[in-house]
Image: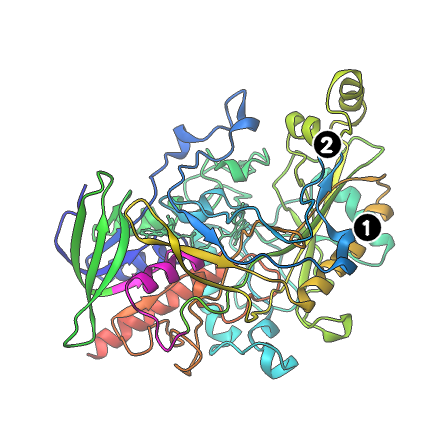
């Protein structure tokens, strides 16, 4: 289906946390907005598998549309060999001495990757905006925490964030709209172990309803957020900003519309519209006064590069991924860790950036359900012989006993990590696909090492037995948070967009997704910050239009 009109005030490409808040803000001011979305539109009440008997085999009803390629693989530094990912069921996953590209986890669909996110909603640590000034690494953001604070508050109220009164290292002007969730029994057991070590688990800040809000009931603690929430309790973009945008009557959302080229008027140097393909692979051109690109930090540089838009050579540089470690062990007591929300608590102890730890960036650690979501995962992952009597006895004695602790830390940009176009591989419309190359630097390796040490201490102190699974980004690339490929900055020589997210040199082109992060912001979940940046950018654009 083509769009209803041939010309719009603004075309937004991508309907995730970078695109939808921007579309809503513009549409609510009366501008006519079209959102092009490559993926499908899902109905939470019908399409998700959590009510099916075989839910555990199904996952998110993901229809693959985004193809990517990968660049060179990093040689593994053997002094960190102990960080390799493994479980009792399969042994070591990556038996080579090179880092393996497993997957880039993006969901194409109305709502973007938040469709199967876990609802964590974090403000960044205030110091994470100033890594260059404070610690001499990477770059500073061209804005500070205080510039984003009012937008954080707006987004938290719209999506419905539950959180405690105070969260360390970030100030707030208004309380969270919803009371925090209680820690699950399993997290309480881990917290007792933490307390013995002098640390504490605080309630996480999550876009998961703890009370009736947005016309949705409170969460039922089924732990199935990554399958897609059938109750609309999780504040994914499809049930928050998308309906708000459509309710204005000024915003049209077009699923299965794959944008392939941003068209620039050679005379004026301004963007004049977008070429996209519909589900029947028919090509269309739609004209627009403004174009905002929000395809995620991999597809956004692909679209810009295929449109021959590369600023001063910075598009695709500074790719950053998720630096992640997690381990699962059995507790003698049955804690039923599969109940609850995926990550209900946080240890903020090491969140402040501090080079004294051997690496500059901050991190956060948490108790989590890990892979222990149901019997199938137990059977396939946690027993050396996954069948027969061993399996039956194993399941009888250990189901519900798995406890898991993990952490995510800052990933600093480096010259070996970037997104470029693959010269050989093409997407379904014949355009070169994005190629991701990502290498871990010394700070990333050291922080993984640190998180492994702390995880072991916490599991041990909590009374857990031997570890049965370890997953880490040391040897596997499976990024869920990606950033940086269209850096925001004041200097066009080393950035792509300015602090209001306008492309340097083309005032009617904007980039409003995770691509604009100058640094990864510590180990925090990024969607809240993406949404706050997107709202701020739309507001600044409206102000400048008003001024003429
Ligand atoms: C398993 C998992 C768990 C996560 N948990 C959390 C969490 O708890 N909290 C959190 O904050 N973050 C979480 N994240 C990360 C979060 O979902 C992403 O960081 C965030 O969605 C990125 O937003 P974005 O707007 O940059 O891109 P996306 O959300 O990926 O949106 C981009 C959209 O653009 C569309 N698109 C791409 N190319 C084109 C094109 N050419 N034409 C038209 N449309 C296009 C895509 O289909 C997609 O819908 C998680 C991610 C995963 C995978
Ligand atoms: S845990 Fe809560 S938010 Fe997540 S899928 Fe279940 S009901 Fe929805």
- Secondary structure at numbered mark 2: loop
293 drawn magenta: yes
Q: Is residue 452 above or below residue 212?
A: below
User: x and y percent of residue 489 in the render?
Assistant: 44, 78
* Number of residues whose C-alpha sits closer than 10 Å to that of mark 2, classed few (under 14), some (14–19) or many (20 or more): some
User: x and y percent of residue 287 in the render?
Assistant: 15, 60
Residue under numbered circle 1: 456
User: x and y percent of residue 506 in the render?
Assistant: 27, 75
Q: What span is in magenta?
A: 291-313
Give residue 89's mark. Answer: 2
Q: Residue furthest left?
A: 6
Query: Residue 53's quadrant in the figure?
Result: top right
Distance Cα–Cα, label 1 vs label 2: 20 Å
The image quadrant where one finds ligand 2 is top right
Give residue 156's mark. Answer: none
Decide which of 219, 421 is in the foreground and name it: 421
The residue located at (67%, 25%) in the rendering is 375
The residue located at (42%, 73%) in the rendering is 314
Q: Which residue lies furthest to the front in this view?
A: 424
Q: Can you say which quadrant of the picture contains the N terminus? A: top left
Q: Can you say which quadrant of the picture contains the C terminus? A: bottom left
Q: In this view, does 453 lie to the left or right of 418?
A: right
Q: In this view, does 368 lie above or below 501?
A: above
User: Is residue 65 at all visible to an observer of this figure?
Assistant: yes
Q: What is the total number of numbered labels drawn onto the structure image?
A: 2
């Amino acid at each position: 289906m083509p769009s209803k009109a041939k010309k719009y005030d603004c075309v937004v490409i991508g309907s995730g946390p970078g695109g939808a808040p921007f579309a809503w803000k513009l549409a609510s001011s009366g501008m006519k907005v079209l959102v092009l979305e490559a993926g499908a539109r899902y109905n939470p009440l019908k399409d998700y598998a959590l009510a099916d008997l075989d839910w555990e085999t199904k996952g998110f009803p993901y229809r693959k549309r985004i193809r990517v390629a990968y660049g060179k693989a990093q040689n593994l530094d053997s002094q960190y060999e102990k960080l390799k990912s493994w479980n009792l069921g399969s042994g070591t996953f990556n038996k080579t001495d090179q880092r393996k590209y497993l997957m880039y986890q993006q969901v194409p669909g109305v709502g973007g990757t938040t469709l199967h996110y876990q609802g964590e909603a974090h403000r960044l640590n205030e110091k994470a905006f100033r890594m260059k000034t404070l610690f001499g690494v990477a770059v500073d953001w061209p804005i500070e925490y205080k510039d984003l604070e009012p937008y954080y508050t707006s987004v938290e109220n719209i999506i419905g964030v539950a959180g405690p009164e105070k969260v360390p290292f970030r100030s707030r002007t208004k309380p969270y709209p919803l009371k925090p969730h209680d820690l699950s029994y399993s997290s309480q057991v881990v917290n007792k172990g933490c307390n013995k070590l002098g640390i504490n688990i605080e309630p996480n800040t999550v876009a998961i309803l703890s009370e009736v809000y947005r016309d949705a009931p409170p969460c039922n603690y089924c732990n199935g957020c990554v399958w897609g929430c059938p109750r609309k309790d999780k504040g994914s973009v499809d049930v928050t900003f998308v309906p708000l945008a459509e309710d204005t009557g000024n915003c049209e959302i077009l699923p299965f519309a794959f944008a392939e080229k941003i068209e620039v008027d050679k005379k004026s140097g301004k963007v004049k519209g977008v070429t996209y393909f519909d589900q029947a692979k028919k090509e269309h051109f739609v004209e627009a006064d403004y174009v905002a690109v929000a395809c995620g930090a991999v597809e956004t540089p692909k679209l810009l590069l295929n449109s021959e838009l590369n600023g001063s050579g910075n598009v695709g540089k500074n790719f950053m991924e998720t630096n992640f470690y997690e381990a699962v062990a059995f507790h003698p007591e049955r804690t039923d860790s599969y109940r609850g929300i995926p990550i209900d608590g946080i240890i903020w102890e090491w969140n402040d950036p501090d080079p004294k730890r051997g690496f500059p960036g901050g991190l956060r650690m948490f108790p989590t359900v890990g892979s222990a979501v149901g019997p199938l995962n137990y059977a396939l992952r946690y027993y050396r012989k996954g069948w027969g009597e061993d399996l039956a006895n194993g399941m009888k004695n250990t189901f519900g006993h798995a406890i898991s602790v993990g952490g995510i830390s800052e990933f600093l940009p480096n010259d070996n990590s970037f997104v470029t176009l693959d010269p050989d591989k093409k997407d379904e419309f014949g355009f070169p696909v994005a190629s991701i190359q990502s290498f871990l630097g010394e700070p990333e390796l050291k922080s993984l090492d640190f998180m492994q040490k702390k995880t072991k201490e916490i599991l041990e102190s909590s009374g857990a037995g031997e570890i049965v699974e370890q997953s880490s980004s040391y040897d596997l690339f499976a990024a869920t948070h990606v950033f940086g490929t269209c850096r925001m900055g004041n200097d066009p020589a080393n950035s792509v967009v300015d602090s209001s997210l306008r492309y340097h040199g083309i005032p009617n082109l904007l980039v409003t997704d995770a691509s604009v992060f100058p640094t990864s912001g510590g180990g925090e979940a990024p969607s809240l910050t993406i949404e706050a940046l997107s709202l701020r950018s739309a507001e600044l654009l409206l102000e400048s239009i008003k001024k003429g």
